[in-house]
Image (cartoon, helix red, strand yellow):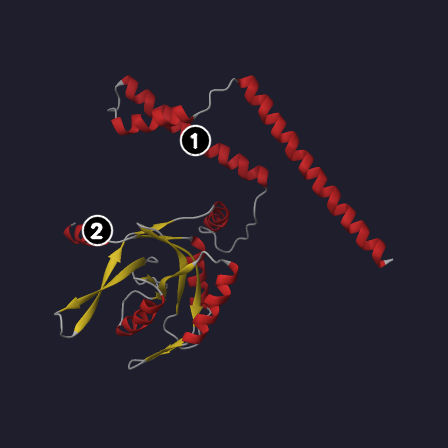
Amino acid sequence: IKDLTDEWMMSVYGPVVKIHPVVLASIGDSYERRNEGASRVIGTLLGTIDKHSVEVTNCFSVPHNESEDEVAVDMEFAKNMYDLHKRVSPSEVIVGWYATGFEITEHSVLIHEYYSREATNPIHLTMDTALQSGKMNIRAYVSAQMGVPGKTVGVMFTPLSVKYKYYDTERIGVDLLQRTRDAPNTTNGLTSDLCQVGGAAGRVQDMLATVLTYIEDVLSGKQMADNSVGRYLMDLVNKVPKITAEDFETMLNSNINDLLMVTYLSNLTQAQIALNEKIVVL
């Protein structure tokens, strides 16, 4: 417990690293496509930085060669790739770099020095693709100089808190991967919009049932009341719009009619485009 507490205390003194699923998938893909004989892959992390967090939204691999004595990184390739990314996503900047593996090596210090020139206080992300501990550990670090002033100065990597964040579009891909986790040999496709709405409604219904069960247990004395849970429930109730069932049904039907009209117009447009292409060919 003391070791976990010490690690947590070290991780709170620094920004929170928020990683998107597409970054983890890209790192795993680059590791699977690595050159023969390469023990690990490295790459540049892109994202945004605010006062309290670093959000990693994209990345790309960088070719490199390393041996026991030296490491060589294709810096020109990294610069060209970053210039191309800036044309597509100008808001994304270099926030650090990643490496597959579980340990921080001496070569990691040299590579980190390069990224320190490209970004202010860059982060270093490690991803255990070899599953040495039985799972894919993902850790983030920030470097700090240590030593006596005027003497030899070393570098210490301090762990940071890591959280996972995703956009709605990324959530669809994550849910699809989750369905194939227990049966990796099966094939699953994307569900329709109606199925996704039905699944979301089912999850909401299950959560409401859990809340109602908790409230009934508290009222009957089977469970102690929690003030924090009560405040969350009160805040949830206050956010529900006050609308009658008739008005809600009218609003829902109106939105459905608008959606059907847009769908009809889009299908009609596609049919006209296809017909026009055939007429031009004739």
Q: Secondary structure at mark 1?
A: helix
Q: Taking 173 as reference, is 230 left or right? A: left
Q: Is residue 265 above or below residue 134?
A: above
Q: Nearer the viewer, mark 2 or mark 1?
A: 2
Residue at 44%, 75% (x, y): give it: 76
Instruction: Give the residue pinned by disc 2.
Output: 8
Q: Taking 210 as reference, is 87 left or right? A: right
Residue that extends furthest to the bottom in the rendered view of this protein: 69
Which residue type does callout 1 highlight?
Asp
Instruction: Give the residue pinned by disc 1.
Output: 206
Residue that extends furthest to the left in the rendered view of this protein: 148
Q: Give the label on residue 273, or none.
A: none
Q: How many marks?
A: 2
| Residue 227, image x, y percentages | 25, 26
| Residue 117, image x, y percentages | 33, 69
| Residue 176, image x, y percentages | 50, 49
Q: Secondary structure at mark 2?
A: helix
Mark 2 in CB contact with mark 1 (< 8 angstroms): no
Q: CA distance from mark 2 to mark 1?
A: 34 Å
Q: Is residue 189 above or below residue 27?
A: above
Residue at 48%, 67% (x, y): give it: 83
Residue at 29%, 17% (x, y): give it: 220
Which residue type does callout 2 highlight?
Trp
128 or 164: nearer the viewer: 164
Q: Circle 2: is it few (<14), some (14-19), or many (20+) Cα within 10 Å? A: some
Residue at 20%, 54% (x, y): give it: 10
Residue that extends furthest to the right in the rendered view of this protein: 282
Q: Earlier in the sequence, mark 2 or mark 1?
A: 2
Q: Quadrant of the C terminus?
A: bottom right
| Residue 249, image x, y percentages | 58, 22
84 or 107: nearer the viewer: 84
